[in-house]
Image (cartoon, helix red, strand yellow):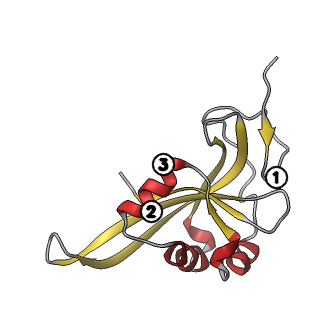
Amino acid sequence: MVNFKVISEYSGGPVPGDRVKIGMGPLYPLERVRALAKDPQQLRLWTRRCAKDVLNLDWSEVDVAEFLAELQPHQYIDSEWCTNGSGVWAACDAYEVKRREPVKTANKEMNVVYFVKFAIGKTGSLVLVVSCHVSN
């Protein structure tokens, strides 16, 4: 028997598992995500990798909150189950954001593609950010 705990508001669909897709469109309305993201206290960088990625971007939780607040429906990729590595799962929506911005190391403006994955927690009061990094 496999034990797992789901901490996302969405808990239906297939049984959680590594890279198991949830094929029904966005699980969380962007209006709710944007509203929660207005308060950085409502964000949790839920995985160690996410915290490391945000640090590598030289972003704060305020920067992540502002980034989430700017998401648009056409940037949605898919939804899937994600884990923090300790048997705890969240059903997440993934988005890809393309922006033109200055890149210091190149000393010019370039297209930069960001990837973010998140869920709304069971209480409905937290956005659990699972991944936030420049696309590979």
The image shows residue 135, relative to residue 3, as above or below, that is: below
The image shows residue 136, relative to residue 16, as above or below, that is: below
Give the alpha-carbon distance from disc 3 to disc 2, as whole Å.
9 Å
Give the alpha-carbon distance from disc 3 to disc 1, as whole Å.
22 Å
Q: Tell me which corner region of the image, top left, top right, bottom left or bottom right, holds residue 98.
A: bottom left
Asked which secondary structure carries label 3, the reply is helix
The image shows residue 42, relative to residue 116, as above or below, that is: below
Q: Residue tagged by mark 1?
A: 10
The foreground one among 7 and 118 is: 7
**Residue kind at label 2, given as amino acid type:** Val
* Label whose residue precedes the other's in the sequence (3 or 2): 3
Q: Residue tagged by mark 2?
A: 54
The image shows residue 18, relative to residue 113, as above or below, that is: above
Q: Residue at x 67, y 81 (%)?
A: 39
Q: Residue tagged by mark 3?
A: 49
Q: Residue at x 42, y 56 (%)?
A: 53
Asked which secondary structure carries label 1, the reply is loop
Q: Tell me which corner region of the image, top left, top right, bottom left or bottom right, holds residue 99.
A: bottom left
Q: Nearer the viewer, mark 2 or mark 1?
A: 2
Q: Residues within 10 Å of mark 2 (few under 14, many from 20)?
A: many
Residue lying farthest to the left in this orientation? 107
**Residue kind at label 3, given as amino acid type:** Arg
- In x, y percent, where is residue 103? 23, 74
**Residue kind at label 1, given as amino acid type:** Tyr
* Label whose residue precedes the other's in the sequence (3 or 1): 1
- In x, y percent, where is residue 16? 74, 35
